[in-house]
């Protein structure tokens, strides 16, 4: 959900800034006079001497009793929404603990960081893996693994992914007593210098 909200907000902000930039360029570069087109009557920037708000625009609603409450309320709402968005970005997505089915109906809690470290160590032991980073996300009853792998130059990605799924992830799923442990793997190749052939 947060990812969708982020994309929508970024898209709307990008479109608004793009249109605002175009509007400023039209007036600043005096494009209507140079290119011979006319702007609508509500367009505020026609020439480089125009301002965003004229004196008449700035004092137009000064005597209206609704003007300042609406302006202050709108800006306050915008500030609160921006603060909520910032706090949502900073919220910890990593699972602190995983609920393990102990068979007695109560369950036990396993530290998420401990499970991540074990899976990362087992993954790094696979041939062709230089480094592994595991992050558990989701709910503690249904965790998901996000795997970042740095592959050695001689690695076979298909073999690494197969063994990651059938060994490291499967061992973690069985040991935690989970029905499923979905995983998303992102692979990168390690940089290495050119080799000389003599």
Image: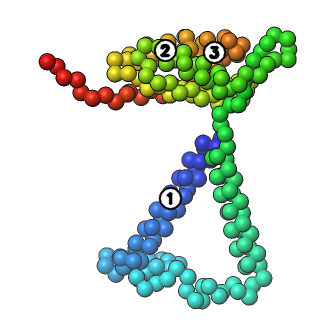
The mark found on residue 104 in the picture is none
Secondary structure at badge 1 equals helix
Hey, which residue is sitting farthest right in the picture? 105
Residue 86 in the figure: left or right of residue 99: left
Where does label 3 land, which residue? 172
- The residue carrying pointer 2 sits among few (fewer than 14), some (14 to 19) or many (20 or more) residues within 10 Å by Cα, namely some
What colouring does the structure picture have?
rainbow
- The residue carrying pointer 3 sits among few (fewer than 14), some (14 to 19) or many (20 or more) residues within 10 Å by Cα, namely some
Tell me, yes or no, if residue 144 can be seen here. Answer: no
Q: 30 or 186, which is in the foreground?
A: 186
Residue 115 in the figure: left or right of residue 19: right
Where does label 2 land, which residue? 125
Q: Earlier in the sequence, mark 1 or mark 2?
A: 1
- The residue carrying pointer 1 sits among few (fewer than 14), some (14 to 19) or many (20 or more) residues within 10 Å by Cα, namely few
Q: Could you say where residue 179 lies in the image, as x and y percent from the top left?
A: 70, 15
Where does label 1 land, which residue? 15
Q: Nearer the viewer, mark 1 or mark 2?
A: 2
The relative height of residue 193 versus residue 18 in the rendered view (above or below) is above
Residue 6 in the figure: left or right of residue 112: left
Q: 53 or 163, which is in the foreground?
A: 163
Secondary structure at badge 3 equals helix
């Amino acid at each position: 959900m947060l990812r969708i909200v982020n994309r929508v907000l970024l898209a709307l902000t990008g479109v608004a800034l793009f249109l605002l930039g175009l509007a400023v360029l039209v007036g600043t570069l005096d494009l209507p006079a140079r290119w011979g087109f006319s702007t609508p009557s509500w367009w505020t920037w026609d020439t480089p001497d125009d301002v965003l708000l004229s004196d008449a625009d700035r004092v137009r609603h000064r005597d209206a009793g609704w003007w300042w409450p609406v302006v202050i309320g709108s800006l306050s709402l915008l500030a609160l929404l921006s603060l909520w968005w910032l706090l949502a970005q900073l919220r910890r997505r990593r699972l602190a603990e995983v609920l393990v089915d102990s068979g007695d109906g109560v369950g036990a809690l396993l530290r998420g960081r401990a499970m991540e470290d074990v899976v990362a160590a087992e993954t790094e032991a696979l041939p062709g893996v230089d480094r592994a980073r595991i992050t558990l996300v989701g709910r503690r009853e249904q965790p998901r693994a996000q795997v970042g792998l740095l592959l050695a130059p001689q690695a076979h990605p298909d073999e690494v992914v197969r063994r990651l799924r059938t060994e490291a992830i499967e061992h973690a799923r069985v040991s935690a007593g989970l029905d499923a442990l979905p995983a998303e793997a992102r692979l990168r190749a390690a940089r290495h210098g050119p080799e000389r052939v003599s």
